[in-house]
Image (spheres, rainbow, N blue to C red):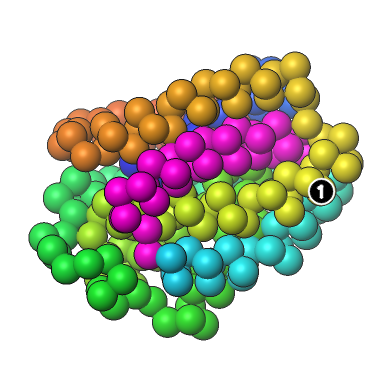
Amino acid sequence: MVGLGGGFVLVPILRLLLGFSPAETAGTSLVLIVANSASGAVTYLMHQRVHLRLGALIAIGALPTSVLGAMLSLRISPRVFDALLAALLIAITVDLVWNAQRRIEGRSETRHVHALKGMSNRLALLVGLAVGICLSLFGLGGGIIVVPALLYFSELPLHAISATSQFAILLSSPPGLITHIVQRDVAWRDAIPLVLGGLLGGPVGARLSLRLKSPQLLVAIALALGVAAASLIWRHA
């Protein structure tokens, strides 16, 4: 519904409530992200809302860091992982509040998505590098990077930004997921029901994003993320 994927909800739960290690948290969350982005991206592609060039460039940039992030998740300490994760959640919170009105209203552009000005190829590749780390190191999903970047540096309307974000995540997630599987980081007992939920939730969220116009929804999500970030910091204080 907000173009960020499910990882930003799932990862704090796996760390705070279930006590997963950083690598297992990222690997298990990434399974959900792949399923969620697949179901959402298919819906967006059917509605021709995806900017294919930007999505592909972001995915290309994410390929090396997606593998690197998965390998790094085995070596990062829980304390550092939680601190960096809390910082990212705070950044998401600030972005949701700061851009709440823009996320709700979108842009009134009516031209075809591919006729609109996107970001430069170089910037898209750089965004992809950051997306790969967020996907495989933290399991958060790349929407926390892609959505704000497209809001700031492109002419795309909000519906195309959410669609392009899901498409880019779908293309860039598999290398990191395969690396996590090889490292045996995925808790399949928990991942399978998460996948089933993601397959159902992705299309529903894509359709609801066309109808929900509530700034209170974004504020509620931002507050929940702020509490999760504070909890991650408090557990090590």
Q: Quadrant of residue 2?
A: top left
Left or right of 211? Residue 31 is: right
Q: Which residue is mark 1?
A: 179
Depth order, front residue of 47/211: 47
Crowding near the residue tagged with mark 1, few <14, some 14–19, many ≥20 C-alpha atoms within 10 Å: some
Q: Is residue 136 above or below residue 65?
A: above
> Where is residue 138 drawn, in percent x and y?
65, 45
Depth order, front residue of 77/49: 49
Depth order, front residue of 123/178: 178
Count of numbered marks: 1
- Residue 58 appears in the rendering: yes
Q: Is residue 192 above or below residue 59?
A: above
Residue displayed at 14% across by 64% down = 109
Residue displayed at 75% across by 17% down = 189
The quadrant of the image that shows the N terminus is top left
Disc 1 marks a residue whose amino acid type is Thr
Q: Is residue 47 magenta?
A: yes
Residue displayed at 54% across by 52% down = 169
The quadrant of the image that shows the C terminus is top right
> Where is residue 152 drawn, in percent x and y?
31, 68
> Where is residue 51 drawn, in percent x and y?
38, 64
From which residue to which does the magenta span run?
22-51
Q: Quadrant of residue 69?
A: bottom right
Residue displayed at 57% across by 21% down = 196
Question: Could you tell me which secondary element the residue under label 1 belongs to?
Answer: helix
Left or right of 202? Residue 7 is: right
Q: Is residue 197 magenta?
A: no
- Residue 221 appears in the rendering: no
Left or right of 162? Residue 83 is: right
Magenta stretch: helix, strand or loop mostly? helix
Q: Is residue 64 above or below residue 115?
A: above
